[in-house]
Amino acid sequence: MKEGRQQHKDPVDAIIGQWAAVRPDLDTKAMEVFGRIYRLSRAMGDRMEKAYAAYGISRGEFDVLSTLRRSGEPYTLSPRQLSATLMLTTGGMTGRLDKLERAGLLRRSPDPHDRRGLQVTLTEKGFDVIDRAVGAGLAVQTEALSFLDDEQAGQLAGLLRELLASTERAEH
């Protein structure tokens, strides 16, 4: 924490206190961490949704547009590549693509290398929207993180990276 700021109690502390009162035998360290991660994820998700809504897109639609933008020129991927990157079913992806295409943010066209396949390409309008939306989203995240100094933010990022890696390894 930056100097001059004190730790304060949060709703997770209250939950931990309640468990301690009725089940003092429980080790609630994991609940303290994951309860806060869950609450933080929900709160930031809501903030991000509002930031993206200003550009007429949802978080899910942001994910599609940002995946195309990050892919580099010509900002084109197959629906299968998008689905794999975003861990979505093809049905879920189709709905997002339909909406984004209607809004003029992307276009679908036949794949010249596979006559059964399609390509999804970011339009100029989509490029503009995603570039502005990513800046707005990063501003929201940066503001939330401003409570920590650079060293603390780096430590937190590193710890979360390790935790995520160990969790993903355990899944496989």
Image (cartoon, helix red, strand yellow):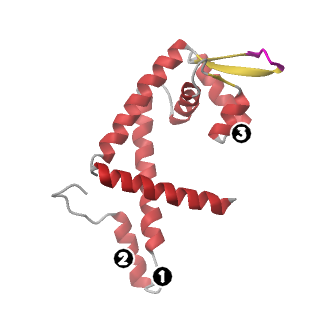
Alpha carbons under labels 3 and 2: distance apart: 41 Å
**What secondary structure is marked by label 3?**
loop
Question: Mark 3 is on which residue type?
Answer: Thr
**What secondary structure is marked by label 1?**
loop
Residue at position x 57%, y 31% in the image: 67
Q: Position of residue 73 (x, y in %)?
A: 58, 19
Residue labelled with disc 2 = 17
Question: Mark 2 is on which residue type?
Answer: Gly
Residue labelled with disc 1 = 26
How would you rate the neighbour count of disc 1 (Cα within 10 Å): few for under 14, some for 14-19, many for 20 or more?
few
Marks 3 & 2, CB-CB < 8 Å contact: no
| Mark 3 or 1, nearer chain start | 1
Residue at position x 15%, y 58% in the image: 4
Mark on residue 93? none
Magenta part of the chain: 110-115
Marks 1 & 2, CB-CB < 8 Å contact: no
Up the image or down, 5 lies above or below 108; here it is below
Mark 1 vs mark 2: in front: 1
Residue labelled with disc 3 = 89
Q: Is residue 63 left or right of residue 51?
A: right
Magenta region, main secondary structure: strand
Mark 3 vs mark 2: in front: 3
Residue furthest toward the left? Answer: 4
Q: Is residue 156 left or right of residue 149?
A: right
Up the image or down, 21 lies above or below 61; here it is below
Residue furthest toward the bottom? Answer: 25
